[in-house]
Image (cartoon, rainbow, N blue to C red):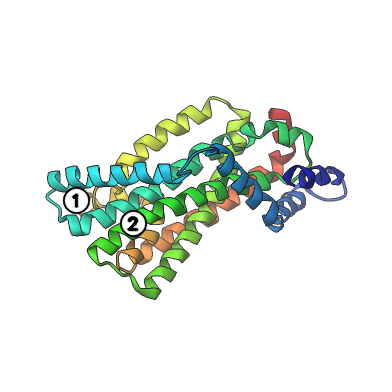
Amino acid sequence: MICLRLRKQRTGVYDSGDRSQSERAWEDLLEGGRRWRLWSKLGWHDIRKRYRRSVLGPFWLTLSMAVMVASLGLIYGTLFRLDLENYLPFLAIGLATWTFIAAFLNEGCTSFIDLEPLIKNVRIPMSLHILRVLWRNLIIYAHNIVIFAGVAVVFGIWPGLGGILLAFAGLGLLLVNAGWIMLLCGMICTRFRDVPPIVASVIQLLFFVTPVMWKPELLGDRRYLMVLNPFYHLIEAIRAPLLGHLPHWENWAFGLLFAVAGWALTFAAFARFRKRIAYWL
C-alpha cells in the first residue's frame, strides 16, 4: 500500500522559474504537513520493520530505560542525598525527554542520507522525510513516557488536567524546535559528511551540562550557565507541569525565541539549498 502511494508521487511537477525559491520552500513545508497520512504510515512502517519478530517491540527500549532510571535513581539519589520520592519522577521524565531529543538530533543529521534511494527516485516534499523521522521518534518517546506514568502511580503524583495540558503545550514547543533543528542538520550533514560524528559528540557533552540527572538547584550561584542552555528550557516546559509545578516564564520565552530564530535561519537555508539536497546525496 505504501509503495503504491509513493509511486503516485512521481507525477509531481518539477521546479520551474515561475516562482521564487522562497515560495517553493514554503510550499514544500505546507505540502509535507498536508501529507500527514503518508509520513505517519511511513513512520509506523519504520517502527514495525525495526522490531519485526520481536515480542515486546519498542517496549524493549522502555524496559532498558526503566532499568536505567531505577539504577541511576538509586546511585545519584544517594550521591546527591536526594529524596527518591522527588528525584525518581524528576529523573524519569527528564531522561525520557532527553532520549527523544538525542534521537531526533542524531537521526535528523542522517534523515536525508538514509533515505537517498527514495529521494532520488520519488518526487515528494523534502520536509516529509523530516516529519517521518520525527514521528518515528515521537512514537518511541510515547513508549518511554510509560515509565514516568508508573513512577507517578507509585509515588502518588497527579499533575491534574491543567498540568497535563501544559505538558502537551511544552511538547508542542519541543516539536516545533525539533522540526527546524532536524531540517537544518539534515541539510548540513548531507553536504558535509563529517558533521554527524561531531553532532554525536556534542550531544554527549550537552547531556552532562543539561539538568537531566542532576537538579538545577545544585548549581547555586552559577545558575546562569543552565539558563543559556535551550534544551533545559524545552525539557522543563514538559517536566515541570508533570511534576505539579508551573514552568518558569523564561522557559517558554527562551523556547519561543529559540523556535523563531531557528526557523528564520532554517527557512532561509532551505529556500536556497532545497534543490541541491538530491545532488549532495
Residue nearest the observer in this picture, 112 or 145:
145
Seen in the picture, residue 252 relative to 140 is either above or below; the reply is below
Q: Residues within 10 Å of mark 1 (few under 14, many from 20)?
A: few
**Residue drawn at (23%, 49%) of the image:** 222
Specify the farthest residue to the top: 194
- In this picture, is 243 found above or below 79? below
Query: At label 2, which amino acid type do we have?
Result: Phe
Which of disc 1 and disc 2 is earlier in sequence?
2
Give residue 218's mark: 1
Along the horizontal axis of the image, is 259 left or right of 84? right
Residue 46: x and y in percent read 59, 41
- Report the side of 254 relative to 8 (left or right): left
Left or right: where does residue 266 sit relative to residue 231?
right
- The circle drawn on residue 148 is 2
Q: Residue at x 45, y 44 (%)?
A: 56
* Amino acid tagged 1: Leu
Of residue 181 and residue 117, the one placed in the foreground of this image is: 117
Residue 279 in sight: yes
Q: Is residue 276 visible?
A: no
* Rendering coords of residue 80 (x, y %): 14, 47
User: Distance of mark 2 from mark 1, alpha carbons?
Assistant: 23 Å
- Looking at the image, the residue that sits furthest to the bottom is 161
User: Can you tell which of label 2 and label 1 is closer to the viewer?
Assistant: 2
